[in-house]
Each structure stands twice: as C-alpha cells, then as structure tokens.
C-alpha cells in the first residue's frame, strides 16, 4: 500500500489544536524574543540599526507563534481504515506515514499538562518499522480513547505477526 494509491486522509486535528499549538509556540518564542531584547538592552551601546533588527526579530518570533499553528492545522491530516492508519503532514513536502493493521505492535495515548487544559490527546501507533511511529496529534481526548479501543480491536482481529 503506497501513499500514491491512498486518497488524502479525511480528518483534521480538533479545532482546539490551534490554541494549544499557539500556547506551545508562545512558550518557546516569548523567551527567545525576550532574551534578544534584554541582550540588546544590557550588552550593547544600543545602536538604532541593531535595535531595529532586534525589534523585527522579536515581532517575527511572535508572528510565527501565532501563524504557524494555523498553518499546521490546515495541512495535517489523518485517517484510520480497516486496513491501515495513515497521516499526511507538510506544506512543501508532504510526508505520509502508513501503518498497516497487520504491522501494528503498540497503541499509546498521551495527554500533556497543557493538552489536558484544552481537552486534547495524541495517539501513537508503533510498528516494527525503522521509520518510526505514526502519530495522530491533537484529538479530542474522548475520541482518542475511542480510536485507541477501535485500533486495538482491529489489530487483534487482523491476521499477521506485527513484525
């Protein structure tokens, strides 16, 4: 089963993923922008050209924190069928990950502290592949639990040795 024979996945992350991802980006970018501004203020003679560059950098960090989650939401897709779990991500380079049901070894759900505030969870489907696990991010936590149960039932009923 190759990605070219699959239709694009139908499902998106939960809409609450956008604010969750925005918070994650802000947790990363606000300190980066703050360090740039404080460094400019403390460690330089404050030349105007450097101040302008630092201001553009700091504003750029905040813009990225707001725009990137919306961009991710538009392109990340996932789907679970009776035959496989597959995801597609990426703007310029579409990255497909496909896990046939017969190769699934493990199904995990995870909810970090910030994720719990938004009522979201991730599902990670691990196979014997060296390419790594298939991860479906930012699902409603109830839906994630149901999908994990469904995947478990399908994989148990699917013949194969998962290797």
Image (spheres, rainbow, N blue to C red):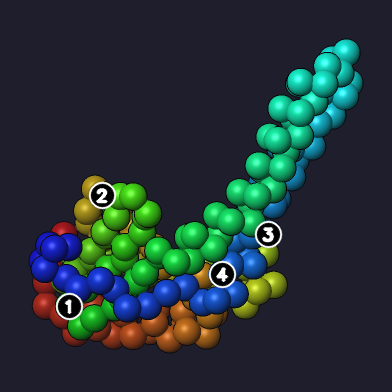
Query: Residue 17 bears which disc, if any?
Result: 4
Residues marked 3 and 1 touching at CB (< 8 Å): no
Tell me the distance, in whole angstroms, between the alpha carbons under discs 2 and 4.
Answer: 25 Å
Disc 3 target residue: 23
Q: Nearer the viewer, residue 100 or 62?
A: 62
Direction top: furthest residue = 45
Residues marked 1 and 4 touching at CB (< 8 Å): no
Quadrant where the image shows the C terminus: bottom left
Mark toward the start of the polypeptide (3 vs 2): 3
Tell me the distance, in whole angstroms, between the alpha carbons under discs 4 and 3.
Answer: 10 Å
Residue 9's x, y, as percent?
29, 73
What secondary structure is found at the residue carrying circle 1? loop
Residue 139's x, y, as percent?
49, 75
Looking at the image, residue 53 lies above or below residue 140: above
What secondary structure is found at the residue carrying circle 3? helix
Residue at 47% across, 73% down: 13
Mark 3 vs mark 2: give the one in front: 3
Q: State left or right for residue 118 relative to residue 152.
A: right
Residues marked 2 and 1 touching at CB (< 8 Å): no
Q: How many numbered markers are drawn?
A: 4
Query: Residue 131 bears which disc, if any?
Result: 2
Residue 66's x, y, as percent?
64, 56
Looking at the image, residue 15 lies above or below residue 104: below
């Amino acid at each position: 089963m190759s990605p070219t024979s699959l239709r694009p996945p139908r499902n998106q992350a939960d809409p609450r993923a956008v604010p969750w991802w925005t918070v994650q980006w802000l947790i990363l970018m606000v300190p980066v922008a703050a360090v740039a501004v404080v460094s400019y203020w403390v460690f330089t003679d404050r030349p105007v050209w450097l101040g302008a560059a630092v201001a553009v950098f700091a504003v750029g960090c905040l813009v990225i924190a707001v725009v990137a989650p919306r961009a991710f939401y538009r392109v990340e897709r996932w789907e679970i069928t009776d035959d496989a779990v597959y995801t597609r991500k990426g703007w310029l380079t579409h990255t497909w990950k496909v896990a046939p049901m017969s190769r699934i070894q493990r199904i995990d759900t995870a909810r970090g502290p910030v994720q719990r505030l938004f009522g979201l969870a991730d599902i990670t489907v691990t196979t014997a592949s060296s390419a790594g696990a298939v991860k479906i991010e930012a699902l409603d936590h109830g839906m994630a639990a149901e999908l994990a149960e469904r995947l478990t039932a399908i994989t148990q009923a699917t013949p194969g040795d998962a290797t």
